[in-house]
Amino acid sequence: MKVAVTSSGKNLDSAVDPRFGRAAYFLIVDTDSLEFEVVDNSDNINAFRGAGIQAAATIGNKGAEVLLTGFCGPNAFKTLAAANIKVANEISGTVREAVAAFKEGKVSFSNSPNVDGHW
């Protein structure tokens, strides 16, 4: 399974970026092999509007079925839900730790956004 993790850096030992739409990077991680693809999100970091929606489309296009992040706003959450991507908020630590927690069933999926828009 492919999971998207918001990341402050380009490897599995990078810290989880707490922001979704304005995260520095997304790591699209294969949970079986831990192989990953780095997706640069610099176009969205300074976007005036729509960063979360664009980020949701990006990870959907990469085949992610789950998002592990700190905070996800309402527009992004709706877009992710429409794409059948499950969202786990309030994730911290490193990307590697987040993926391990997911694999061990230690993350809870959200039913709603956990921050107002434009955070």
Image: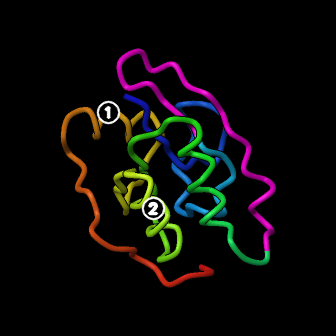
Q: Earlier in the sequence, mark 1 or mark 2?
A: 2
Residue 83, above or below 119: above
Image height of 33 relative to 36, above or below: above
Observer-nearest of 41 and 61: 61
Q: Residue at x 56, y 56 (%)?
A: 56
- 102 vs 47: above or below: above
Magenta residue check for 67: no
Residue in the image at 37% along x and 36% along y: 99
Residue 100, labelled with which disc?
A: 1
**Bounds of the magenta segment:** 27-47
Residue at 43% x, 31% y: name it.
Answer: 2
Crowding at dot 1, Cα within 10 Å, few <14 / some 14-19 / many 20+, comes out as: some
What's the CA distance linking mark 1 and mark 2? 16 Å
Task: Give, as a three-letter code, the residue at label 1.
Answer: Ala
Task: Name the quarter where the N terminus is drawn.
Answer: top left
Q: Quadrant of residue 114?
A: bottom left
Tag 2 secondary structure: loop
Q: Local crowd at mark 2 within 10 Å, few (<14), some, or many (≥20)?
A: many
Question: Could you tell me which secondary element the residue under label 1 belongs to?
Answer: helix
**Which residue of the protein is positioned furthest toward the front in this rendering?**
82
In the rendered structure, which amino acid carries the disc numbered 2? Gly
Residue under numbered circle 2: 70
Q: Residue furthest bottom?
A: 116
